[in-house]
Every structure is written in C-alpha cells, then in structure tokens.
Image (cartoon, rainbow, N blue to C red):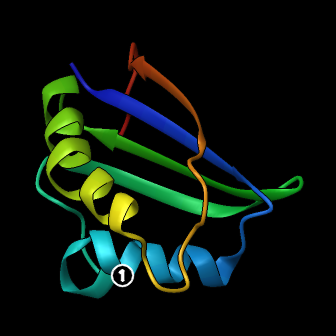
C-alpha cells in the first residue's frame, strides 16, 4: 500500500529546500529516489512543506534510514537546520 509523508519546516525557505533535495535525491535533486512515486514541495504559511508518496511504508523507512537521516544528522550545507513536523499515513486513495 502506498505510504504518504508530509513534512513542514517552520521558517523553511526555497533555498534551504533546494540545498536539501540536491543532497538526498538522485541526480542532484532532479529525480526521485528508489521507491518514491510522488514528490511536491512549496511555500506554506510560515515555512516550507514537502509531500512525498512511496510505494510502501518499507520503502519510506529505507529511504529515511539509509539516506535522509544520515544526511540530516551530518548537516546539509545551506539546507534545513531543524527536523520537520511530520505527518504520515497509508494512502487509501492514490490516483496518478
């Protein structure tokens, strides 16, 4: 079942997003990581929001544990400086 993740970075900016996505997505942020089937990001009230959908919860956990968190822990130059507020859910309906 598809698994959705919504991240909100209070005070986050487009520049922080672009630095972060370049560090954690293939081809410098120009393509999706293995298992991710959707990605959208943009400004939201008081910060920056990202929504991603993975093929499964396992796919999300693998990306999070193997790529995202190690990069965030070591710091991404120019990237987000604090963890996001996170909401996750199994997608009941996913239309492509």
Give the x, y percent position of residue 31: 25, 74
Q: Which residue is mark 1?
A: 22
Kindly indicate the quadrant of the structure image that contains residue 15.
bottom right
Kindly indicate the quadrant of the structure image that contains residue 2.
top left
Disc 1 secondary structure class: helix
Q: Residue at x 25, y 57 (%)?
A: 70
Kindly indicate the quadrant of the structure image that contains residue 87.
top right
Give the x, y percent position of residue 45: 88, 52
Q: Residue at x 45, y 73 (%)?
A: 20
> Is 95 positioned to the left or the right of 19 in the image?
left
Q: Residue at x 23, y 49 (%)?
A: 36
Q: Residue furthest right?
A: 45
> Is 48 positioned to the left or the right of 63 in the image?
right
Camera-side residue: 68 or 35?
68
Q: Residue at x 35, y 51 (%)?
A: 38
How many residues crowd around disc 1 within 10 Å: few (fewer than 14), some, or many (20 or more)? some
């Amino acid at each position: 079942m598809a698994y959705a993740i919504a991240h909100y970075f209070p005070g986050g900016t487009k520049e922080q997003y672009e630095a972060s996505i370049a560090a954690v997505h293939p081809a410098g942020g120009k393509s999706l990581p293995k298992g991710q089937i959707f990605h959208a990001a943009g400004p939201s009230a008081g910060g920056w929001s990202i929504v991603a959908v993975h093929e499964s919860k396992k796919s999300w956990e693998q990306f999070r544990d193997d790529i995202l968190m190690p990069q965030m822990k070591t710091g991404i130059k120019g990237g987000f400086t604090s963890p996001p507020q996170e909401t996750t859910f199994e997608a009941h309906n996913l239309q492509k």
